[in-house]
Image (cartoon, rainbow, N blue to C red):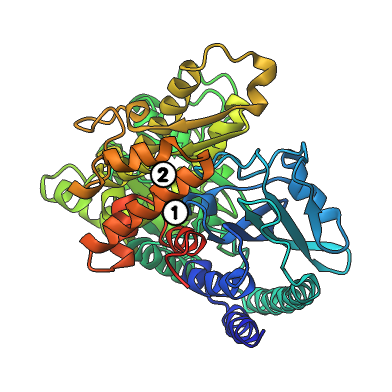
């Protein structure tokens, strides 16, 4: 209990200081480990309420992509039962309620196992959940329920205090016109995205123009929305206009508006995008595509804060914050004479570069979890997961199309996996678990079938292992195989557990838990 209190104290201190979620991942994981580390749980999660969904902030024994998945109570009866239970909610081994993590582990959680959870509350308000799963019957029977419930109540109280401190800090910031309307962002693992989010937090409360640049598909539009949401203009409109999609002869009218009869075909008055964004933010996507002839007029608006609709004799004041978005190198465009230098410097008041996905492989599992959950809902299946080889293939690929390519790759893979199970009737889909393998991903220059684990000792089961297994019950044979495989990799890696986990393609925490169950660790 002392280690739990220490971990809780440290987490509360950092929450109260306003540390961001991407820097708190280790603290949440440490806290979860102190709660369940001495139990025989094979999988556990700590979830917090984020608006109307439960979001895992720490997982043990589960793939890391689970942290990228939202869990809605109405879609997960077991989580709903835990949330409604006043104490420790235990499920009987033969419970017919689907397990939200079934299919995310190699073992089938729909079979007999031990499962429980406890709600974290502030009075009647749900703040989060703690879940524990053991893969053996009565695997959690020795758990001290009174101690777990006391810890859960203390954690709920601390989460409420941290939330109140965060609310007070936000209200004070709003009173000072600083950090208003801060919207929740994706919680990244990678240093490049953490640096981007820090820079975004710095510039968002200001009215400085931002030049947002990066390769196609990196998620620049999502960053632009986050900039607006975290600005003091968050209550105003966010107007997005794709400069490349506007017909050249109508660009001025689209941006600045026109009066009736201003030109042939102008049958009625039209508000332009600047007028529609008054009091808010105007996102100029693909700004590098603007014709040179129009660029001086855009520069004048930025300098004077006024627009003059076509056919109007008077200027109109507008209060607009500009976010210019491009995948071009505008500095090179200036040198080539295709973009005005004065407009470039006006737009480039605060540049933000969104890093390509190949420079932040640590984020792939979070993004994959998010897209897998989207596709699970779209296809109406019970769960959708990546096997270890597919996750390794995603991490190894360079992603020239960035986040958009990852999204489309997983959508196609999910559809292929469903297509392989054509015998499934629509009514039975909600019970189906789809596992994505490398051949579903169909990435260029990647193996199309699951490959053996690297290392000569692990390339295939030995004849002795196979013959022994034939004379044993399935569970015991599986345990023996796993025990020998782990021992072989440990020996090859000089007892380096992290390297062994990487070779086996599983989460290091899961490997330690399996090793303890198999008697390989104390």
Are dots 2 and 1 in contact, CB under 8 Å? yes
To which residue does mark 1 refer? 322
What residue is at 52 percent from the left and 60 percent from the top?
Answer: 517
| 181 vs 106, nearest the viewer | 106
In this picture, residue 250 sits left or right of residue 180: left
Mark 2 Cα-neighbour bin, 10 Å: few <14, some 14–19, many ≥20:
many
The image position of residue 496, as x and y in percent, is 28, 68
What residue is at 61 percent from the left and 45 percent from the top?
Answer: 101
State which quarter of the image contains the N terminus. bottom right
Q: Is any part of residue 354 visible from this angle?
A: no
Q: Is residue 160 shown above or below 10?
A: above
The image position of residue 142, as x and y in percent, is 72, 67
Q: Is residue 66 shown above or below 40?
A: above
Check disc 2 and report its element: helix, strand or loop: strand
The image position of residue 83, as x and y in percent, is 80, 55
To which residue does mark 2 refer? 284
Q: Is any part of residue 6 visible from this angle?
A: yes
Q: Is residue 413 shown above or below 119?
A: above
Q: Residue furthest left?
A: 336
What residue is at 65 percent from the left and 28 percent from the top?
Answer: 431
What residue is at 57 percent from the left and 71 percent from the top?
Answer: 37
């Amino acid at each position: 209990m002392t280690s739990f209190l220490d971990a809780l104290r440290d987490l509360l201190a950092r929450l109260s200081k306003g540390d961001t979620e991407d820097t708190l991942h280790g603290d949440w994981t440490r806290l979860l480990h102190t709660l369940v580390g001495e139990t025989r749980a094979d999988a556990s999660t700590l979830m917090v309420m984020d608006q109307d969904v439960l979001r895992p902030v720490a997982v043990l024994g589960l793939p890391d992509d689970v942290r990228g998945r939202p869990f809605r109570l109405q879609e997960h009866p077991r989580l709903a039962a835990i949330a409604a239970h006043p104490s420790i909610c235990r499920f009987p081994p033969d419970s017919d309620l689907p397990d939200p993590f079934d299919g995310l582990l190699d073992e089938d959680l729909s079979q007999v196992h031990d499962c429980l959870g406890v709600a974290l509350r502030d009075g009647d308000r749900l703040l989060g959940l703690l879940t524990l799963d053991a893969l053996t019957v009565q695997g959690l029977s020795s758990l001290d329920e009174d101690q777990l419930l006391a810890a859960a109540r203390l954690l709920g109280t601390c989460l409420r205090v941290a939330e109140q401190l965060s609310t007070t800090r936000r209200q004070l910031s709003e009173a000072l016109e600083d950090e208003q309307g801060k919207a929740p962002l994706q919680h990244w693992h990678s240093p490049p995205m953490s640096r981007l989010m820090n820079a975004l937090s710095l510039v968002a409360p200001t009215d400085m123009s931002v030049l947002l640049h990066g390769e196609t598909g990196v998620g620049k539009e999502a960053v632009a929305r986050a900039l607006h949401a975290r600005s003091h203009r968050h209550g105003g409109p966010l107007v997005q206009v794709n400069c490349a999609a506007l017909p050249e002869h109508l660009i001025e009218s689209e941006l600045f508006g026109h009066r009736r009869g201003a030109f042939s075909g102008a049958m009625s008055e039209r508000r332009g995008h600047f007028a529609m964004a008054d009091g808010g933010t105007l996102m100029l996507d693909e700004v590098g595509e603007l014709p040179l002839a129009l660029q001086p007029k855009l520069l004048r608006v930025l300098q004077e804060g006024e627009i003059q609709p076509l056919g109007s004799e008077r200027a109109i004041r507008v209060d607009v914050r500009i976010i210019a978005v491009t995948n071009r190198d505008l500095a090179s465009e200036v040198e080539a004479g295709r973009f005005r230098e004065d407009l470039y410097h006006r737009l480039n008041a605060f540049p933000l570069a969104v890093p390509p996905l190949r420079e932040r492989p640590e984020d792939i599992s979070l993004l994959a979890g998010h897209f897998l959950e989207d596709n699970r809902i779209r296809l109406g299946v019970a769960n959708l997961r990546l096997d270890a080889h597919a996750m390794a293939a995603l991490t190894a690929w360079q992603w020239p199309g960035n986040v958009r390519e990852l999204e489309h790759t997983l959508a196609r893979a999910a559809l292929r996996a469903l297509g392989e199970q054509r015998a499934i009737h629509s009514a039975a889909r909600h019970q189906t678990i789809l596992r994505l393998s490398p051949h579903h991903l169909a990435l260029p220059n990647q193996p199309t079938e699951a490959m053996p684990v690297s290392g000569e000792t692990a390339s295939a089961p030995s004849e002795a292992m196979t013959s022994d297994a034939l004379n044993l019950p399935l569970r015991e044979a599986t345990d023996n195989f796993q025990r020998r495989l782990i021992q072989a990799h440990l020996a090859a890696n000089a007892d380096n557990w992290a390297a062994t986990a990487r070779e086996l393609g599983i989460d290091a925490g899961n490997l330690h838990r399996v090793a303890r169950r198999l008697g390989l660790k104390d």
